[in-house]
Amino acid sequence: MKAVFGLGNPGDRYANTRHNVGFLVVDALAAMVGVKLTKKKFSARTGEIHIGGERVFVAKPQTYMNISGQSVAQAAGFFRLDVQDIIVVYDDMDLDFGKLRIRPEGGAGGHRGVKSIIDRLGSSDFNRVRIGIGRPGESDHTAVGHVLGSFSKDEREELDEIINRAVDALRTAITSGINVAMNQYNG
């Protein structure tokens, strides 16, 4: 079994913010096979899908971004997942808007949701799909204002394509492995 966790913040207030791009991607992944993430389990909205014969648990932690590790650790313990079977999808300010970066491990890079997962799992060896949201512009004077801000009009025009590319990357990682996905989608 594999598990995909999209990071974000729950509630309408955060629904269309850059910080919730992980939620948008896992919703699209589940919708691709006609599943809505409506079950409540492990402090998350969850569902189960099958991709290429692989059983995949899909979740959007509802604990707020900074304590996402609580939800991920609960699910990982319940399903007895190896950390290498976990894929976390999240926003990254250090990447240009729309750029994907897939990695099999790494540090938190200043992302508090990822730091929470590393702390709770006791490992940083889980797979990541990072989606670039770019750095704050002149109108967003702080990083917090940027990540919790809504997508600009120009960003919204590109968002569906970015989400679809991230979904394709996830499908490749699940069916062919993280290294194949890295070779096809990084850069």
Image (tube, rainbow, N blue to C red):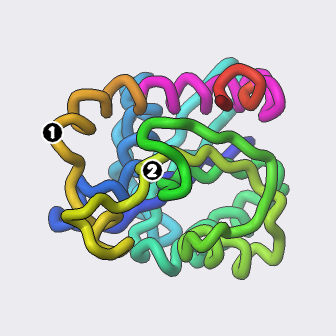
Q: Is residue 19 above or below residue 84?
A: below
Q: Is residue 179 magenta?
A: yes
Q: Quadrant of the C terminus?
A: top right
Is residue 176 something that shows in the picture? Answer: yes
In the rendered structure, which segment of residues is drawn in magenta? Answer: 164-180
Q: Which residue is mark 1?
A: 153
Tell me the SS state at disc 2. Answer: helix
Tell me the residue at 31%/33% (across/down). Answer: 159
* Among the 4 quarters of the image, the one containing residue 182: top right
Give the quarter of the image for residue 52: top right
Which numbered mark, 2 or 1, is in the foreground of this view? 1
Label 1: how many residues lie within 10 Å, few (<14), some (14-19) or many (20+)? few
Q: Position of residue 11 (x, y in %)?
A: 22, 67
Could you say which disc has been placed on residue 65 in the image?
none
Image quadrant where one finds the N terminus: top right
Residue 9, percent from left and from top: 35, 67
Mark 1: secondary structure: helix
Place of residue 108 in the rendered image (x, y in percent of width and height, measured from the top left): 67, 69
Circle 2 residue: 22
